[in-house]
Image: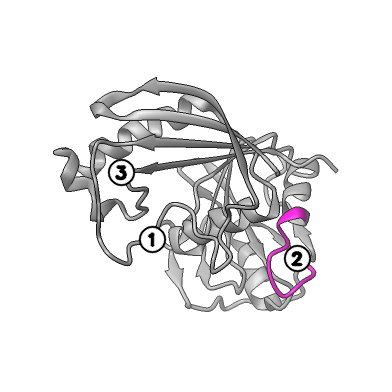
Amino acid sequence: MTRPYVICHMMSPLDGRLIVNDWAEGTGHSIDELVNVYDSLHEKIGADAWLSGRATGEEFADAVDQPYETTGKAERPVHIADPDANEFAVIVDKDGRLRWDKGDIDGAHVVVLTARDVDDVYLAGLMQAGVSYIVSQADAVDLKYALDILGEEFGVKRLMLEGGAQTNGHFLNAGFVDEVSVVVFPAIGGKSNSPAIFEGGDDGLADKVRLTLLSVEPANLGSVHLRYRVDRP
């Protein structure tokens, strides 16, 4: 199978902090203004799917830990709710905690990635809501399997990874990121215990990734847009 080309697209201050609320004030601009710069570069790069983890998914879901009231046998391991979709919002939700009552986020068709222990009631609820899903045959979400299915059965060619620190770290550690795109804003967060845009656990990522500079471009609000090709050592 052919997996999508994966671009990890993030925004940060000079010290690489993830939580925008912790550093946005240092730019002298509102968070909405910063996000507009980030989003405009997202559109410029282009992708037919974006992916985030469960924590980011909570911002878009209709409910959290609120079960569906559905019955019936659900399709496994893959359900394609909209065969005509050409833009996708992919949400990693291993345990099926997020409830969706509609099948899109701002026009992007929702595809949920779960692990094998998710129950049929949840999957049936996704089917009823018009949401697609991919169930991994493991205790965790199998990234390789999910990416292969997204490419082969959903037709995704370019996927924008916009996850949290751990999601980004998992993808990098597994070797599934082809390019890193970072919008660096003129600010320093400096807040203790604030996560970085990439987290690789106790072992880190230093021996997993080699970066080759592709481009450096000034962007709006004093930011700089950096793009790197990702290789394995």
Marks 3 and 1, how far apart at CA: 12 Å
Task: Give the main secondary structure of the magenta stretch.
Answer: loop
Q: Which residue is mark 1?
A: 195
Q: Residue at x 33, y 55 (%)?
A: 19
Q: Which residues are magenta?
A: 136-144
Which kind of residue does numbered mark 2 sit on? Ser
Q: Residue at x 52, y 59 (%)?
A: 53
Q: Which residue is mark 3?
A: 13
Q: Quadrant of residue 106?
A: top left
Marks 3,1: beta carbons within 8 A: no
Image quadrant holding the N terminus, namely top right
The 10 Å Cα crowd at callout 3, few under 14, some 14 to 19, many 20 or more, is: many
Q: Depth check: 225 or 62 in front?
A: 225
Which kind of residue does numbered mark 1 sit on? Pro
Marks 2,3: beta carbons within 8 A: no
Position of residue 201 in the picture relative to residue 233 (left or right): left
- Colour scheme of the picture: one colour
Q: Position of residue 199 (x, y in %)?
A: 50, 59
Marks 2 and 1, how far apart at CA: 28 Å
User: Which numbered circle lies on residue 136?
Assistant: 2
